[in-house]
Image (spheres, grey):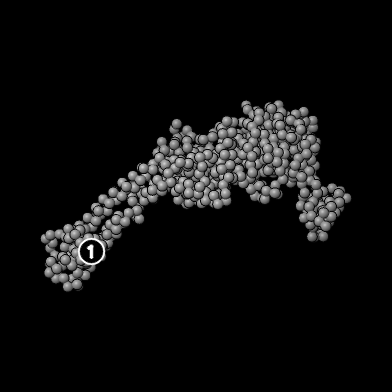
Amino acid sequence: MRLEEYWGVGPKTRALLVEELGVDAAIDAIEAGDVRALVDAGVPRGRATRVLRRATGGSGMDVLATSDARDVYKELLSVAGSFALTARAADAIHVLTPLSDRDAMEARLADVEAARGSWEALSDDEREAVVEAFDAYDAADGGEKASVEAAIALLSAGVVEDDGVFAPLAGLDRDALADAARALGALQAGHVASGADDRLDALREQVAAVETLEANAASVVEAIRGDGARSTGGFQDAFVDHVCGETGVDATHVREAAPEGARDATDFVNEALRALSDDRREAVAEREREVRVELQGAVADAREDVDRAVAAVDDVAFELSLARFAAAFDLTTPEFVADAVAVEGARNLTLAAREAEASVQPVRYALGEHDLGAPPGRERVSVLTGANSGGKTTLLETLCQVVLLAHMGLPVPADHAAVGRFDSVVFHRRHASFNAGVLESTLRNVVPPLTAEGRTLMLVDEFEAITEPGSAAELLHGLVTLSVEKAALGTFVTHLADDLEPLPSTARVDGIFAEGLTPDLELEVDYQPRFGEVGRSTPEFIVSRLVANADDRAERAGFETLAEAVGREVVQRTLADARWTES
């Protein structure tokens, strides 16, 4: 395959990859989903991620039929990625895509659940040791040495067993890996690093000292003469003593470097130091070759274990990262069914990531054929009604999250979930723009997936926000009817339920209800939809809060006029109930 045939690889990106990596290495990086290789080559991280998502899961990405569905997908990856143990694991999470094959979904789910079992079986101290091992790996920016040291740390922590997520590290020779780690640390870009060999370090120090004398040859002559050496023989002996004292070089090597037939003292010193410098550099090169061979031998002796460690560490980090994500939100494995979306105890993952788990009310909801308890019917399409700020949009988003996570082969935020496979997920959030252009673009986004081949899930929020109520009701009725005709599943949020009658027989109306105000005058909502009931907007609660909070007399009078419009008795009763609850 040619580079330019990959989605998102245009002429500029291709030229960059060819220059930095070469064609074959660039193709290998793309096929392997290696974000870092592309980023290191100069491709912006966002583009690299998009290219790899399409390259590794192009057909799965087609499930995301709208920009809002794609936004939910990115939000899910962001939350999951926040639990990554390493930067490489985060990169790998961010290129996960929906899968088009159910066997692949189930296989990935099984891997995540197995990893979660391993993670949850660890003690707090063991978890801390695992995190520290991967922190050190990340600080070293990966590589063979970092992988080997991470494997050693995990082996030392006692977490490696013959089964579970750490199994790929089982059986590694820790002593051989330790020798290899030392050798890899000493071998840097083909050179032997300082500290690897005492003799080599001493020779390098001699070279530096001799080169310093060579650069200051005139000072050497003056120092020797200042010590009283005047005759030729006396000068040469003093030169040897001086150089040995300044550099630590053995006298034999210094004498061997002394020239014969020098014109004068200055010529003698220059030639002798030049020869001695060359001699010491040759000694360094010879010793470095010897040490490098020894170090490479240590790595070669442990090569099989090193390769296993390198291959395993990134895989273990990736799987454990997903396990931590699943454990943090108590995610569960969904049941894959033929044609349904059904959840019990479902939580919105975005809310759960921002707020305390206890503040997120779990809900149950269902469309299509399922075996969960509620609702009792098997309607394929629902119209969801109810109070402003009642959680209708959040419910749509939660269903979208559950479906997309299941399609990615990841556990979902629900106590129980049954999910069918979809070719298109149409999620459309409420957009407060009221013009023909927005209406046209919205219809262009939500209708084509319905008319295409395959299974479609429709999750459409407040369609009436983009056109006048009369037209909105007609168009929304048409969308509901089209969804039924095309055997789609779908939920449509609206305040126009009464205007949609009669609905197709396979559609139902559900409602979310506000129940009053809290003592803090916050809207109190039961976020669990009531099946088969039309929810009502609750302006009296909002007006009651405005009346109670108004400090300005004229402002309060204005809100009291509105209270007359919605029902003064209702407003008074609402405020009385709130105060009674407070007392």
Q: Position of residue 446 (x, y in %)?
A: 66, 34
Whether residue 221 can be seen here: yes
For numbered disc 1, what is the local secondary structure?
Answer: helix
In-front residue for pair 444/209 = 209
State left or right for residue 446 relative to residue 5.
Answer: right
The residue depicted at 15 percent of the width and 59 percent of the height is 259
The residue depicted at 79 percent of the width and 30 percent of the height is 502
Relative to 249, does residue 138 appear above or below in the rendering?
A: above
In-front residue for pair 421/188 = 188
Q: Quadrant of the C terminus?
A: bottom right
Q: Position of residue 324 (x, y in %)?
A: 58, 45
Q: Which residue is mark 1?
A: 244
State left or right for residue 490 relative to residue 32.
Answer: right
Count the numbered circles shown: 1
Q: Position of residue 210 (x, y in %)?
A: 25, 61
Q: Residues within 10 Å of mark 1 (few under 14, many from 20)?
A: some
Please state which amino acid type lies under the numbered disc 1.
Cys
Q: Quadrant of residue 535?
A: top right
Relative to 119, does residue 224 appear above or below in the rendering?
A: below
The residue depicted at 43 percent of the width and 46 percent of the height is 174
In-front residue for pair 156/130 = 156
The residue depicted at 44 percent of the width and 40 percent of the height is 308
Q: Quadrant of residue 556?
A: bottom right
Q: Position of residue 330 (x, y in %)?
A: 64, 44
In-front residue for pair 133/437 = 133
Give the residue furthest to the right.
569
